Amino acid sequence: MRSALAPLAHRDFRLLFLGRAVSFAGSAMAPVALAFAVLELGGSATDLGIVLTVAILPQLLFLLIGGVVADRLPRHLIMVSSNALSGLAQGAAAVLLLTGRAEIWHLAVIAVVRAVASSFFFPAQQGIVPQLVPRAMLQPANVLLRLTLNVTTIGGAALGGIVVAAAGPGWAIGFDALTYLAAAAILLPMRVAAPARDAATSFVMELRDGWDEFRARTWLWVVVIGFAFSNGASSAATQVLGPIVAKEALGGASVWGLALAGQGVGLVLGGLLALRYRPSRPLRSGVAVMLLVVPPLALLALEAPWPALAASMVGGGIAIELFSVFWDTSLQGHVPNAVLSRVYAWDALGSLVLMPAAFAVVGPVSAAIGITATLWACAAIVAVAITAQLASGSVRQLPRPDLG
């Protein structure tokens, strides 16, 4: 256990750890609050899908720019600015909802602002970890950082559902705004230098260098393509159709929050397992276990009682966490830090690229063939996408990086 907590001995890593914990405490409430805010404003599954679509599109446009910027500037300052912008955007949403002036298009515009901020935050966050701890501590550092997300997800999702049911989504989104601003204040004192780079290199050339590093690694782009399909199908099913099923058949926002909290429990368990489980072929293990994300989609299609759904989400959470830790450790161990944020940007771009289309079409498709049939189709897409990755020898045989 002492070795698992060793990264916390480093001051800047402690600040990152605390800042993420505070920020995610509010962010865990946001998906439940946003979904039911749209539904309470009279929106349909299609309307919710549109709001989520416009929240993804700016990320596709700005992620690559964010990756280049994060490989040029001190990464913690980019994270501070992104958190501050997200906090102001969520604060505006909360005010509109609490004063009764909100409309669906307001939420869509605010989602765009948050998406732009996230496009700069994500590459900086992923690239900064190897600057804060020795290489030998990368896996426990990644686990600890993800535990901040996962622990807050357990309480945040459940509490978000309760707050939305009792007081309305405006209060939950307002809390999210405050946590973003608090996280920005926590990260500001970090002392992290800008990554080493050739000052004469142009923006376009640096963008191209990131692409060259990305495409040179077969295991990397095979996994990203697979998750483009998997993420699109699973996100559309849970974020658009899940709240609809919960409202109509499971008991509403509070029950949906509890079901999502089950995934949070699984994420924590997966993180604890990842502290000790260090396979020689981590990417193969991480991809294979992701098949556990299929059962929750099947149970949604069956409109199973929420305890069964929550239990299946525990397994899905374990899978997501193991994959995420092994994926981050593989990238940070096999990709040079000077280009790491750009590679993460290409990774995120590929992983998100099909989500806007999935969010946009899942509502109309479910209206045409029914929610149940649509959920079964999503489950099948996820299963095929995960299985196909394991057909690649580069994925199955990628060794654990030498972390010293």
Image: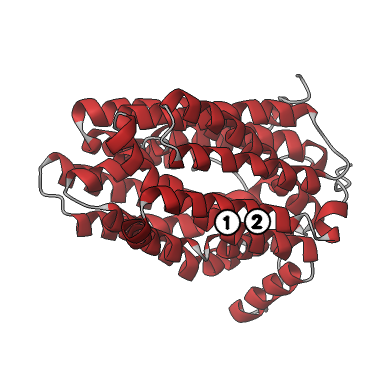
Number of numbered discs visible in the structure rendering:
2
Give how far across and how far down residue 63 sits, in percent.
52, 64
> Going by the picture, which residue comes out furthest to the left?
100
- Secondary element at image label 1: helix
Give how far across and how far down residue 110 sits, in percent.
29, 56
Residue located beneath label 1 in the image: 381
Give me the C-alpha separation between circle 2 and circle 1: 5 Å
Give how far across and how far down residue 67 sits, in percent.
58, 64
> Going by the picture, which residue comes out furthest to the top?
1
Residue located beneath label 2 in the image: 384
Tag 1: residue type?
Ile
Tag 2: residue type?
Val
Please state if 176 lies on the left or on the right of 208 as rendered: left
Residue 167 in the image: above or below residue 216 = above
* Quarter of the figure with the N terminus: top right
Kindly tell me whether residue 156 is visible in this rendering: no
Q: Nearer the viewer, residue 117 or 367?
A: 367
Name the quadrant containing residue 246: top left
> Residue at position x 77%, y 59% from top?
336
Please state if 342 lies on the left or on the right of 99 as rendered: right
* Quarter of the figure with the C terminus: top right
> Residue at position x 37%, y 63% from top?
360
